[in-house]
Structures are given as C-alpha cells and as structure tokens.
Image (cartoon, rainbow, N blue to C red):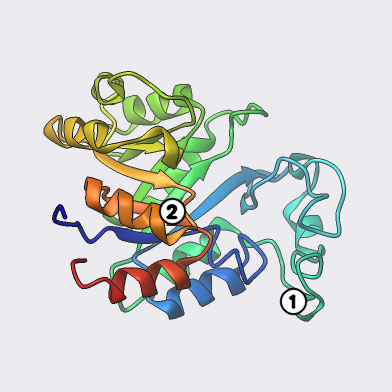
Amino acid sequence: MPKLTRPQIWAHRGFSHSYPENTMASFHAALSLGVDGLELDVHLSRDGHLVVIHDERLDRTTTGTGLVVDHTLAELKQLDAGSKFAARFAGERIPTLDEVLVLVSQSSRPITLNIEIKSGILPYPNLECLAYEAVSRYGLLQRVIFSSFNHFAMRNLKQTYHGSRIGLLYTAGLVDPWRYAQFLEAEALHPLFYSVDKSIIDDAHRAGVAVHAYTIDDVDDMVRLAADGIDAIITNRPDVMLQARNNHESL
C-alpha cells in the first residue's frame, strides 16, 4: 500500500452537516472538533459590508427573501439563519467576515481560513480586494487563502496584492491544471474531488502548487486522496474525516 499523507481537514461552511452552514455556531463547532481550517463564502451587503453566506439569494438558508446585495447589514442581521436548518438553531444570524476573522485571530491553534469570493454570478466590484483588506487589518494574511470560480477576480487580487494567496476553484476535468495555476501565479488548485487524481497532484506539487479538493464526505474518498498526496480536503463532515484520519494507522 502506498504511503499516505496526512491531509489537512477544512470544514466546508463550518460543520455544515450538523449545524446551519456559514453561521458562527457552525464555525465554533468545527473549531471545537480540532479542524485544520475553515471554508466560508462572502458577499456584499447593499451598504458595502462583507457578509458570510453562500447563495446570492437569502431564501434557502434564512427567513429573508431576495438578493443579499439588495439588503443593508442592519436588515440582514434581522434575519434568522438557523431555523430553516433546525428549530434549535433559531436566532442564528448571518455573520460578517469581521466576526469570523475575530474568531480565527483568537484561536489557540493556527487555523487556515479559506475565503471563497462569490462574484461568479453577480458582479461585486473589487469584492476580492475588500476581503483582502479586511484580512490584512487583522494581521491574518499568512493564514488565509482566497478562492473563487471567478478566476478574473483571482487574477485581479493577485495583480493588486501580489502577496495574496489564491486557489482556483473548478469542476471540470482539466488537462495540466498546474500550468494554468502557474500562469495566474496561484498557490493552489481547488478541484471538485473526482476530477483530480495522483498524477495531477504529483505534477502540481512538482510545480509548487498545492491541491485542496472539495467536497469530500466519504471516508473511502478521503483515504484515496490521502494516498494520492492531497494537501487538504474540504468537507461537510469534519467529525467523520478527522476520526478517519486519526484512526488510520498510516495517516
């Protein structure tokens, strides 16, 4: 059996299997498990605040309706972001990015924060740069990687702040994706997990590019990717992934 790596475990939207996604409850729960990183999504409110929510619309995860960007922060903070997941989470609110950055800055462990820039469907001008500047204010740039399906946003971020760390999200089975990563000076690839294999990971590593795959909730997939040398897995089930990693003698 090939030697397995010990991949980092990043909680996708926090501990989103058991807590309402992208809420402080979800992030606190993930950190209490001992995850290596948190993944979250950012949008802009109507009055220019960075808010943590996945969808462009409020309807799926909150008691609100319509677009996030059509509401002020004060209006967004009135919404319930927990009760649609389960009644016991009623009263959870949409966090600001600042709230999460405070949490990460106070962590006793060096948590990686993966901030996904959600400018692929709605055009948020300079959302990526606003997020970078927020992270900079907290002195967390070395612990944050920015990612997006909007690679124009990643290029803009890298050109504006050359020291920013970026990961390229994608779903397709790309040929030689590390070459594209090098072209954009990206530190990492963030592929959908079944579009990546050992040859891609090995070639990416030879090119100095890390590979962080999403969204892995099955232990067999995690073990396969660990055997292939994956750097991090992004999961809705950090509890299961951490236990599997810690119980696997070779990890």
Label 2 residue SS: strand
Where's residue 163, x and y in %? 25, 38
Q: Quadrant of residue 35?
A: bottom left
Residue 139: image quadrant is bottom left
Circle 1: residue type: Phe
Can residue 141 be seen here?
Answer: no
Residue 136 seen anywhere in this rendered image of the structure: yes
Q: Residue at x 81, y 65 (%)?
A: 84
Residue 15 left/right relative to 145:
right
In this view, the mark in front (1 or 2): 2
Are there few (<14), some (14-19), or many (20+) residues within 10 Å of tag 2?
many
Whole-percent x, y for residue 194 in the image: 43, 38
* Residue pictured at 32% horizontal, 51% vertical: 224
Q: Which mark is residue 109?
A: none
| 59 sits left or right of 221 in the view | right
Towards the viewer: 48 or 85: 85
Residue at the spot of label 1: 89
Which residue is at the front of the view, 164 or 30?
30
Asked whether, in this view, residue 51 is left or right of residue 181, the answer is right
> What residue is shown with label 2?
234
Please report whichever mark, 1 or 2, sits nearer to the chain's N-terminal start. Answer: 1
Give the CA separation, mark 1 to mark 2.
23 Å
Name the quarter where the N terminus is drawn: bottom left
| Amino acid type at mark 2 | Ile
The x, y position of residue 64, in whole percent, is 86, 54
Judged from the image, the secondary structure of the residue bearing numbered disc 1 is: helix
